[in-house]
Image (cartoon, grey):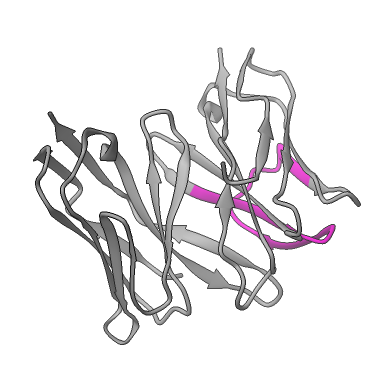
Amino acid sequence: GIQVEQSPPDLILQEGANSTLRCNFSDSVNNLQWFHQNPWGQLINLFYIPSGTKQNGRLSATTVATERYSLLYISSSQTTDSGVYFCAVPAWETSGSRLTFGEGTQLTVNP
Amino acid sequence: DSGVTQTPKHLITATGQRVTLRCSPRSGDLSVYWYQQSLDQGLQFLIQYYNGEERAKGNILERFSAQQFPDLHSELNLSSLELGDSALYFCASSVAGTGMNTEAFFGQGTRLTVV
């Protein structure tokens, strides 16, 4: 099946710093999702981004499907950005689908 | 709020017991997915239903079963529970079952602790 790799596994920042998280995938995909899992365990949708670039406030994401990677940019980080960031890609079967998740990037933003 | 509702939020039970986790998808979504997140396995896909029919299956244990009802809510049944079944169980929903429109939205999860 498709493999998803995220880097870095861990990232520690000071409040106000910028960061880039990377997601590589082993096969062509038609869409990709980024999620933030907060310290309470909730998975929050950040982006649904098959290709191109999207922006939402201080966060933006770029997917280059032909080169099989996606980047998540966090600017002016805040302590509330802490948590685990996952990317996930679909694996389609004959009549259904599933998401394959990367191992995540654990982000800690210190005040 | 994703619009996906899971109950209960927390569950503590003993080994050998059976529990049922419940999920209500977002309004208009026909597809429901179940995922398990444990410390050593990451987020693992269990099973997908679309409009009441099973559509995809992951490495779901035989002790686990699921169904989707006519009103589209879904239940995940876990039986003969073992300590290793302790995990966060997520339900997700999407409009479609395959192809486009499969953006998944996740519920808050059920944290299961088996003691």
Tell me residue B94's x, y (percent): 65, 60
Q: Which residues are magenta?
A: B44-66
Q: Please, which residue is most extreme toward the front here?
A: A57
**Magenta stretch contains residue A43:** no
Residue A12 figure quarter:
top left
Vertical comparison of A94 with B16: above or below: below
Tell me residue A93's x, y (percent): 62, 74
> At x 34% / y 64%, what residue is drawn?
A4
Tell me residue A52's x, y (percent): 34, 80
Number of numbered discs? 0
Which one is nearer the viewer's eye here, B2 or A95? B2
> At x 53% / y 21%, what residue is drawn?
B83
**Magenta stretch contains residue B54:** yes
Residue A64 figure quarter:
bottom left
Describe residue B33's horizontal placement relative to residue A60 as left or right.
right
Tell me residue A27's x, y (percent): 38, 79
